[in-house]
Image (spheres, grey):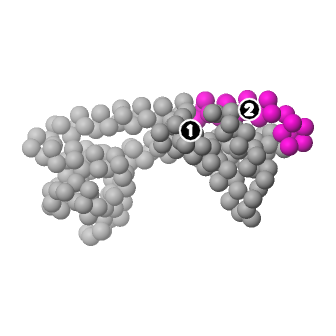
Amino acid sequence: MLLKAALAHVQFETIHPFLDGNGRLGRLLIALLLCEQKVLREPMLYLSLYFKTHRQYYYELLNNVRMTGDWEAWLDFFAEAVIVTATQAVETAQQLLDLSNQDRDKISGLGRAAASTLQVHRALMEHPIATSGSLVVKTGITPATVNKALGHLEQLGIVKELTAQKRNRLFSYAGYIEIMSRGTELPGR
């Protein structure tokens, strides 16, 4: 199925059916094809960053397929992109799991406040940037308890308040976001 996705991507990029967005849509189609064929359960294989990181070579390979039929070099590149991207995804997932476990251990030491603080922590793992109001909705905990939990999480260094306001404060699960952001910067920026 990876082979079919690689072939479909080249065909889509060659047809270039739209005035704008062909590249983004072509890269998205890879993940959607793999989901449709049950290779992936979720469209979590994001090859776009790898292709952008190696943009010049990527374009050369696509052009070489069109001009000389050099499918082998394209397929090698595509396979390497899948390997590198999948490996990075596994490493990121492990880092997030480790962070979550470390933070849960810290929260466990809070005594009675640990249960509600753990609920807020779990909600922040799903939405790492949130308002106290959205956490109230997500957890079903009272606003006062959510705010106390956020205070505990701030003291533990798990959460950062981003807005410095009294109302409508925005909170960030900083470590989670830092892990998710690693390696997403394009070279030269």
Packing grade of label 1 (10 A; few <14, some 14-19, many >=20) is few
Report the disc number at residue 73.
none
- Looking at the image, which residue is at 75% across and 44% down? 10
Q: Is residue 90 left or right of residue 57?
A: left
Viewer-proximal residue, 39 or 158? Answer: 39
Of the residues tagged 2 and 1, which is closer to the observer? 1
Measured from the top left, where is residue 66 in percent x and y? 86, 43
- Looking at the image, which residue is at 47% across and 35% down? 92
Q: Quadrant of the N terminus?
A: top right
- Looking at the image, which residue is at 52% across and 44% down? 43
Asked which secondary structure carries label 1, the reply is loop
Residue 14, magenta (yes or no): no
Measured from the top left, where is residue 73 in percent x and y? 79, 31
Of callouts 2 and 1, the N-terminal one: 1
The quarter of the picture where residue 30 lies is top right
Q: Which amino acid, by three-letter code, is at mark 2? A: Leu
Q: Which amino acid, by three-letter code, is at mark 1? A: Gln
Q: Which residue is mark 2?
A: 75
Residue 74, magenta (yes or no): yes
Q: Which residue is mark 1?
A: 37
Measured from the top left, where is residue 164 in percent x and y? 32, 65
Asked which secondary structure carries label 2, the reply is helix
Seen in the picture, residue 155 relative to 61 is either above or below; the reply is: below
